Image (tube, helix red, strand yellow):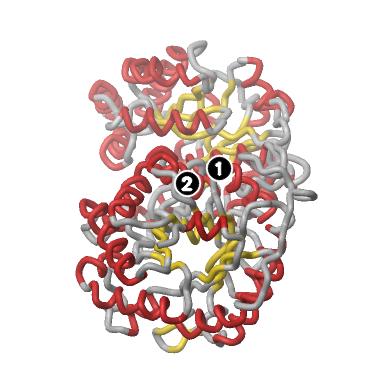
C-alpha cells in the first residue's frame, strides 16, 4: 500500500477525497451528533463514505477525525477517549482503502485561540495534537493532513506534534478568506515559506470560499515554495435553504478548477465542504491527463520559520508620550480615573479634565464600560479630552465588545488620531450590567490584546504583515495583587509582561501589607506597577466595595474606621476616607511607579486632595 511520502516522491498528480460530514449527514447521522465518534459508534456509515470516495478515484482518503482532539471532544464528554476514537477512525479508513489508496490522518484546529492571541500555550496545543497523532498512528495511517487552520502558529504546533511522534509525511493546509488572506491577515507569501520551514512536506489551502479563490492562493504559493502544493476547495459559497446550507458548485466546475490548480503548480487536489464523490470523480477525470508543472527553486523565496515581513523596532518608550517618558525615567506618576458620561454631553467630563490638568495630574484614566455599563466610548472620550485640554488620557480598552478585526480597526484609528496611552482589559461580562441579555464577544482576552498592541508597535498586523509606520502605544494591563487565586493571577500577569506590557495598574488597594505580599512577586517581572487608590466617601461606599465589587478587598479595620467616622456625618466620613487614601499613597510612594486615584462620584477635587496636589 502506498504512503503519502511514496506519492510525493513519484512526481505525479494525486486526488484527495472530499467532504466527510456531508455524506455522513446524508446517510443518517444527526446534524448535532459528534461526527468524530462515528467510526467507533457507527463504523458502517464512515466505511460507506470512504468506499464512495475510493470508487470515485481518490488516491488518498482522510480519516474521520478532523475534530477528534481532546479540547473539542471535551464538549461532548469524550476527551478521555481521544486516542481510542482516533485509532478507530484510522482502522475504519484503513479497511476501506484497500491496497492501492493511502490513508491520511486528518487533524483540524483545536477550536480555541492559542498564544499570542489566546490563553492556550503552544506547548499545550502541541500536547493536545500529540494525543490525536498517537491515536491515528496506532490505527495505521500512511501520512497526515493538517487542515483548515487560520493560525500559522497553531498549525506549526500540529506539525511539531507529528514530527515528535513519527517521520511520516505531512500535508499542511491553511484556510483563507475572500481576500486570499487568513482570518489573521497572513498572506500565502508568508505562511507558505513558514510552513515549509517548519517541516511540512506539502503546503496548501483548503475550505475557503471556493475553487476560484483556492486557485489564486495556489498561484501565489507556487511563487514562494518549492515543495509540493495541495488544494481542496469547498463546492463554492453555500446558500442558506431553511436550516440547511446548499453548496452550488457543480462537479464539472470543481473538476475544471482542479485541472487549473494542477496547471498552476498543485500536485494534490480534492475537495472540502459540500463536495461529494461525484465532485471527486470529476476531479479525477479532469486531472488525469494533466502533467504536473515542474517547479525548480530558481526564483522561489527561501523558506524560513519567521514571517515574510520584518518587524520594526518599537518607538522608544520615552518618545511615545509624556506619561511614557515619566515611566521610562522612573518618575512618580499620578493619574485620576474619570468615568465617561452615560449620555452624549461631554461638557462635565471636559471640565473635570481641565481641573485635573491645572492641578498637575499626569493623565486621566477612562474606564471602558465598567461593570458592563453602557457609556460613551473611552477611546473617543480620550480623544476629546486630549484635544480640548493639555492633559493626556489613558482610555481603557475592553475585549468584551469587539472581535479581533474590530479591535485592529479601532487601534489603528486611535493611533492615527493621536492617542498614545492605553490600558488593556478583558472587560466585565454583560450579566453584571443593566442589559444581561447582551452578548459578549471576548474574541481574545487581555493577554491576546496586549500581544496585538505589541505587534502594532512593531508595525505588524496579527498575521505578521507589515503595516508601514508603527503605532506608538504606551499600553498597560490590569493586575490584582490581592486576587483570591494569586497563582493564576501571577501566571496571567507573566504572560502580559512577556507580551510587552509597558505598565500595570492594580485594582483599588486598601491594605498595605496585602499589597506588599503581592508586590514581592509582581515586581520580578520588571513591569512598572501603578497602584489603584480609592478615597472612600461613606461607610456605605466601603461596604459596597467590600461586598459587591469583584477583586477588591476592604479590610475590617478600614470598615471600622469608616463606621466610626460615619457617626460624625457625611463630611467627617469623607475626610476619613481621604485620610485613609493619603496614608496609602504615603506608604507606597517610592516603592511603586505611581498611583491611579479614583474620583468617587466625579469628585475630582477629592482625588487631587489625595494626591497631595494643589487645585
Q: Looking at the image, is mark 1 or mark 2 earlier in the sequence?
A: 2
Circles 1 and 2 in contact, beta carbons < 8 Å: yes
| Between 28 and 374, the one nearer to me in the picture | 28
Q: Position of residue 566 (x, y in %)?
A: 29, 29
| Between 355 and 185, the one nearer to me in the picture | 185
As drawn, the label of residue 375 is none
| Between 2 and 504, the one nearer to me in the picture | 2
Residue 139, quarter of picture: bottom left
Q: Position of residue 343 (x, y in %)?
A: 55, 58
Secondary structure under badge 2? helix
Give the position of the C terminus as an image quadrant: top right
Residue 163, quarter of picture: top left
Is residue 163 something one can see in this rendering? yes
Q: CA distance from mark 1 to mark 2?
A: 7 Å
Q: Position of residue 399 (x, y in %)?
A: 49, 49
**CA neighbours of label 2 inside 10 A, class few (<14), some (14 to 19), many (20+):** many
| Between 484 and 209, the one nearer to me in the picture | 209
Give the position of the N terminus as an image quadrant: bottom left
Which residue is tagged 2? 159
Q: Is residue 207 above or below residue 587?
A: below
Q: Is residue 194 left or right of residue 222?
A: left
Secondary structure under badge 1? loop
Residue projecting furthest to the right = 299
Q: Is residue 374 above or below residue 212?
A: above
Q: Position of residue 416 (x, y in %)?
A: 74, 47
- Which residue is at a point 68% across and 23% down the rendered structure image? 325
- Which residue is at a point 68% across and 52% down the rendered structure image? 225
As drawn, the label of residue 198 is 1
Amino acid at each position: 500500500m502506498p504512503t503519502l511520502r511514496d506519492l510525493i516522491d513519484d512526481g505525479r498528480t494525486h486526488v484527495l477525497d472530499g467532504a466527510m460530514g456531508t455524506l455522513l449527514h446524508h446517510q443518517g447521522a444527526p446534524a448535532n451528533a459528534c461526527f468524530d465518534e462515528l467510526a467507533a459508534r457507527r463504523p458502517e456509515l464512515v466505511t460507506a463514505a470512504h468506499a464512495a470516495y475510493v470508487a470515485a478515484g481518490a488516491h488518498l482518503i482522510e480519516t474521520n477525525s478532523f475534530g477528534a482532539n481532546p479540547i473539542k471532544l471535551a464538549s461532548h464528554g469524550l476527551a478521555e477517549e481521544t486516542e481510542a476514537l482516533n485509532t478507530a477512525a484510522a482502522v475504519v479508513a484503513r479497511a476501506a482503502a484497500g491496497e492501492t489508496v493511502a490513508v491520511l490522518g486528518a487533524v483540524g484546529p483545536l477550536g480555541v485561540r492559542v498564544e499570542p492571541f489566546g490563553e492556550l500555550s503552544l506547548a499545550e496545543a502541541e500536547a493536545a495534537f500529540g494525543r490525536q497523532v498517537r491515536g491515528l498512528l496506532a490505527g495505521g495511517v500512511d501520512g497526515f493532513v493538517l487542515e483548515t487552520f487560520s493560525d500559522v502558529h497553531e498549525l506549526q504546533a500540529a506539525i511539531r506534534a507529528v514530527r515528535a511522534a513519527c517521520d511520516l509525511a505531512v500535508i499542511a493546509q491553511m484556510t483563507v478568506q475572500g481576500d486570499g488572506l487568513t482570518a489573521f491577515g497572513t498572506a500565502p507569501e508568508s505562511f507558505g515559506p513558514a510552513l515549509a520551514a517548519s517541516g511540512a512536506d506539502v503546503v496548501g489551502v483548503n475550505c475557503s470560499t471556493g475553487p476560484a479563490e483556492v486557485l489564486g492562493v495556489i498561484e501565489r504559493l507556487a511563487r514562494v515554495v518549492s515543495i509540493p502544493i495541495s488544494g481542496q476547495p469547498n463546492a463554492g459559497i453555500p446558500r442558506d435553504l431553511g436550516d440547511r446550507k446548499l453548496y452550488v458548485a457543480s462537479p464539472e466546475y470543481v473538476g475544471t478548477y482542479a485541472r487549473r490548480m494542477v496547471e498552476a503548480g498543485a500536485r494534490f487536489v480534492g475537495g472540502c465542504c459540500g463536495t461529494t464523490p461525484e465532485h471527486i470523480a470529476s476531479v479525477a477525470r479532469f486531472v488525469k491527463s494533466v502533467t504536473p508543472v515542474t517547479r525548480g527553486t530558481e526564483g522561489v523565496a527561501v523558506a524560513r520559520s519567521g514571517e515574510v515581513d520584518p518587524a520594526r523596532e518599537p518607538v522608544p518608550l520615552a518618545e511615545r508620550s509624556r506619561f511614557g517618558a515619566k515611566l521610562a525615567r522612573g518618575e512618580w506618576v499620578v493619574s485620576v480615573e474619570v468615568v465617561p458620561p452615560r449620555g452624549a454631553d461631554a461638557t462635565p467630563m471636559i471640565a473635570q479634565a481641565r481641573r485635573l490638568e491645572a492641578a498637575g495630574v499626569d493623565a486621566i484614566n477612562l474606564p471602558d464600560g465598567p461593570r458592563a455599563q453602557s457609556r460613551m466610548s473611552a477611546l473617543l472620550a480620550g480623544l476629546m479630552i486630549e484635544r480640548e485640554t493639555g492633559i493626556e488620557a489613558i482610555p481603557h480598552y475592553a475585549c468584551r465588545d469587539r472581535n479581533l478585526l474590530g479591535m485592529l480597526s479601532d487601534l489603528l484609528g486611535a493611533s492615527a488620531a493621536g492617542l498614545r496611552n492605553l490600558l488593556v482589559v478583558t472587560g466585565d461580562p454583560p450579566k453584571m450590567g443593566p442589559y444581561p441579555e447582551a452578548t459578549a464577544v471576548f474574541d481574545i482576552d487581555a493577554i491576546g490584546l496586549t500581544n496585538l498592541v505589541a505587534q502594532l508597535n512593531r508595525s505588524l498586523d496579527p498575521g505578521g504583515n507589515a503595516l508601514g509606520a508603527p503605532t506608538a502605544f504606551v499600553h498597560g494591563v490590569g493586575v490584582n495583587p490581592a486576587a483570591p487565586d494569586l497563582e493564576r493571577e501571577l501566571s496571567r500577569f507573566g504572560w502580559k509582561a512577556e507580551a510587552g506590557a509597558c505598565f500595570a495598574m492594580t485594582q483599588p488597594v486598601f491594605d498595605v501589607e496585602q499589597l506588599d505580599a503581592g508586590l514581592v512577586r509582581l515586581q520580578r517581572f520588571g513591569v512598572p506597577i501603578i497602584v489603584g487608590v480609592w478615597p472612600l466617601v461613606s461607610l456605605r461606599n466601603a461596604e459596597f466595595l467590600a461586598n459587591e465589587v469583584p477583586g477588591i478587598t476592604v479590610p475590617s479595620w478600614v470598615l471600622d474606621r469608616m463606621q466610626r467616622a460615619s457617626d460624625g456625618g457625611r463630611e467627617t466620613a469623607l475626610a476619613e476616607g481621604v485620610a485613609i487614601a493619603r496614608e496609602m499613597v504615603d506608604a507606597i510612594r517610592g516603592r511603586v511607579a505611581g498611583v491611579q486615584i479614583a474620583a468617587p462620584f466625579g469628585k475630582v477635587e477629592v482625588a487631587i486632595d489625595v494626591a497631595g496636589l494643589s487645585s
